[in-house]
Amino acid sequence: MAEESDEIIVQKPPFQTPKGVHDILPVDHEYHTYIKKVVRHRARQAGFRRVSTPIFEFTEVFKRSIGDTSDIVSKEMYTFQDRKGRSLTLKPEGTAGVVRSYIQNNMNQLPQPLMLYYYEPHFRYDRPQKGRYRQFWQFGFEIIGESDAALDAQIIQLAYKIYQDLGVDKVLKLQINTIGTAEARKKYVGVLQDYYTGKERSLCEDCRYRLKTNPMRLLDCKQEDCKILAQLAPIMKDYLDKESLDFHEELRGYLDEMGLKYEENPKLVRGLDYYAKTVFEFVEIEKDQVAQNALGGGGRYDGLIELMGGQPTPAVGMAAGIERIIASMKREKVRVPSKDDLHVFVAQLGNEAKRKCLPLIEKLRNAGLKTMGALGKGSINVQLKIADKFKVPYTVLIGLTEVREGNAIIRNMEKGVQETVKMEKVVSRLVKLIGEKNLDRYTPGELLYS
């Protein structure tokens, strides 16, 4: 007689996602799908073409574009070496990759301005919090090749229309500012450093570092003491050149003409040298009128393409965070249409019925009816309970009697009534009951334009 084993099997804990990332479950995919369709529709209306850049780039792409002193490069990038020792980075933002692609693929030879958009995941080692993840999705628009305040206004209007389509425009306010040209900012940066000299003790650790490396970022700090000092800091507009101020006034005129409400925020800045003139953000406001999150924003980056090795080329762009938009939509109780709801559930009893079900399910799907079949061994009552959980309007029942007589039962799940029809009539009868306009039917040609 074999001895019993004394070995104790220790149950290993189930795997969890790493901190700062999350699964996109089916209910949230409905939001993603809806947002993507709205973005695509508005982009097509305005003549934008979609572009996708790789998930990772050479690290130097981001170091050169964003800058070594930025928080993104110094603290937040996911950087690794490949097997040949080359440094690669998961993209933390979209514009640098688009600009790299513009230069590499000689897109300056295409008709200008070139208008591109994207909808992609990005990665930052940031402190996870509500609406902020380490893998996050953004959509963005870039207009490359022209310097015109009308283009800045167009990209702002395009973003606003998308927020309006998504039902969150009522909780947003548009803030704008001008940061002038790089030459004009040099004088202001000196004034700013003079203002903060002697006040270092009141600054947070990050801002004490920024004072030496990137002083304009001090105006954007969220720490309370830093915010108070920023409110009292010299205003940038007082030190800008006439060209920058005139460009900003032109932008304001276009926004006024389009009826877009906005407010001037002189503390709204971008800390990178390649930014110029226009900067803007769509800021979410809670009921107590305290600003919370920026759902999106952008600005003009006339110096970036030259910095990345291309010819001097003006450009303007914007990006928006999908997760933050979804959170705002949920707070506003915005319901999105779902095309995932089933039309028909096919229930069967016995092997003969199961054999009849398989081709029937395929015919129903080909006819545009979203169909699910329970092909297990559960009783009809068990299968009907499953159909109830999926909230299907109709269930097809096939048992031994139906197989023998060549029939099927169509049950109206809401009314609890049913009818018996010939097997060859099941598809046409259900198409009539569901209605042509509700079918999920595509031809290959229609798929090209969906």
Image (cartoon, rainbow, N blue to C red):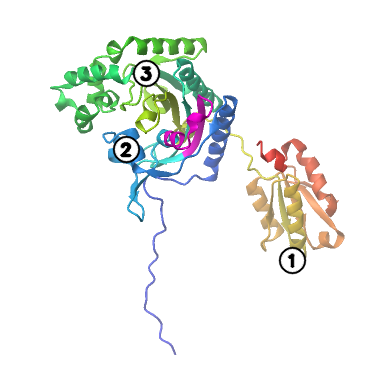
Q: How far is mark 2 from mark 1, CA to CA?
A: 64 Å
Question: Which sits in the foreground, 44 or 322?
Answer: 44
| Residue 198 image point, x, y percent | 12, 22
As shown in the figure, which amino acid type bears the numbered disc 3? Answer: Lys
Residue 200 in sight here: yes
Looking at the image, which residue is at 41% across and 82% down?
A: 4
Which element is circle 3 on? loop
Looking at the image, which residue is at 21% across and 19% down?
A: 192
Q: Quadrant of residue 48?
A: top right
Disc 2 or 3, which lies upstream in sequence?
A: 2
- Where, quadrant-wise, is the N terminus in this rendering? bottom left
To which residue does mark 1 refer?
351
- Where, quadrant-wise, is the C terminus in this rendering? top right
Residue 54 within the magenta-colored segment of the rendering: no
Question: Which sits in the foreground, 224 or 161?
Answer: 161
Disc 2 or 1, which lies upstream in sequence?
A: 2
Q: Is residue 258 above or below residue 323?
A: above
- Mark sitting on residue 277: 3
Which element is circle 2 on? helix
- Label 2 with label 1: CB-CB less than 8 Å: no
| Residue 232 image point, x, y percent | 23, 16
Please provide the residue range marked out in magenta: 99-120
Q: Residues within 10 Å of mark 2 (few under 14, many from 20)?
A: some
Residue 254 lies left or right of residue 362; in this view the side is left
Q: Is residue 129 above or below residue 268?
A: below
| Residue 386 image point, x, y percent | 65, 52
Which element is circle 1 on? helix
To which residue does mark 2 refer?
63
Disc 1 or 3, which lies upstream in sequence?
A: 3
